Amino acid sequence: MWPLSPPLHGARASYETCISLTRGMGAQKRRSRLTAAAGAIDTAGEDFRTAAAGQTLHTLDPEKFQIPGIGEEEKADKRASAIEELPLHPYLDHIDGQAWLAAEVVHEDGFVRLEFFVSPPPCWDQVLTARARNHFKLFGLRRTYALQANRFIGEIRG
C-alpha cells in the first residue's frame, strides 16, 4: 500500500514530474490537469480515512494511490497482506501514554547494554499487539533504540 522504507521520490521530485508532463500544453490545460490530480488526491484521502475508521487499511487498492508519471518499475509493491502486517500509524493508532516498549539490561563481558523489545499492555488486542511487533521489526527499532541508548550509556561511563 505505502512504502515501508523512505520514499524513493520526494515531494519536490513528484511535483517536478507532474509539471514536466504538462509543460508543453499551455496554462489552461495544465491547470485542468493539476485540478484533476488534486481531486484524485482528495478522493484517495477520503478512501484512506474511511478505511482507517473501519480498520480495513489492508484492503485498499494501491492503484488508487499512484503518483502520475512514476512507473511501476520504479516502485515495489509493499502492500500488507493481513491487518497484522500494517505498521502503526502515528495519528490513527492511539497508543500515546501506554507503555509498550521495554528494555532489558544485559551484562556481558564486562559491558552493560540494553536490549529493547515490544511489551504490550494487557488491554491491547491480538491485532494491535501483532502490529506493534511488526512495526518494531519492520523499521529495525530494536537496533536503532539499542544504538542510541548504548551510545548514551557509553558517554555516561566515559
Image: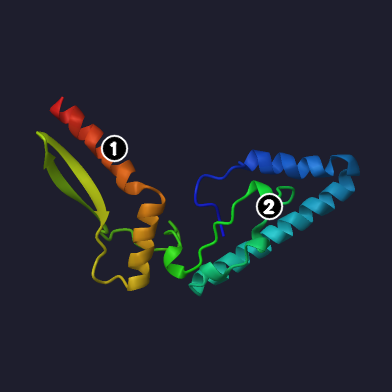
Q: Nearer the viewer, mark 2 or mark 1?
A: 2
- Residue type at the position of mark 2: Glu
Residue 98 occupies quadrant: bottom left
Q: Residue furthest front?
A: 109
Which of the pair 27/3 is nearer the observer? 3
Which of the pair 20/45 is nearer the observer? 20
- Residue type at the position of mark 1: Leu
The residue indicated by pointer 1 is 147
Q: Position of residue 115 (x, y in %)?
A: 22, 47
Q: Position of residue 6 (x, y in %)?
A: 52, 44
Q: Is residue 61 left or right of residue 107?
A: right
The residue indicated by pointer 2 is 72
Q: Residue 70 got which mark?
A: none
Residue under the image location 88 percent in, 50 percent down: 29
Q: Is residue 30 left or right of residue 18?
A: right
Q: Position of residue 114 (x, y in %)?
A: 20, 43
Which of the pair 53/105 is nearer the observer? 105
Image quadrant holding the C terminus, namely: top left
Residue under the image location 62 percent in, 66 percent down: 61
Image quadrant holding the N terminus, namely: bottom right
Residue under the image location 18 percent in, 34 percent down: 153
Density class for disc 2 (Cα within 10 Å; few <14, some 14-19, many ≥20) is: few
Q: CA distance from mark 2 to mark 1?
A: 35 Å
Q: Is residue 18 above or below residue 62?
A: above
Give the SS element for disc 2: helix
Residue 19 occupies quadrant: top right
Q: Earlier in the sequence, mark 2 or mark 1?
A: 2
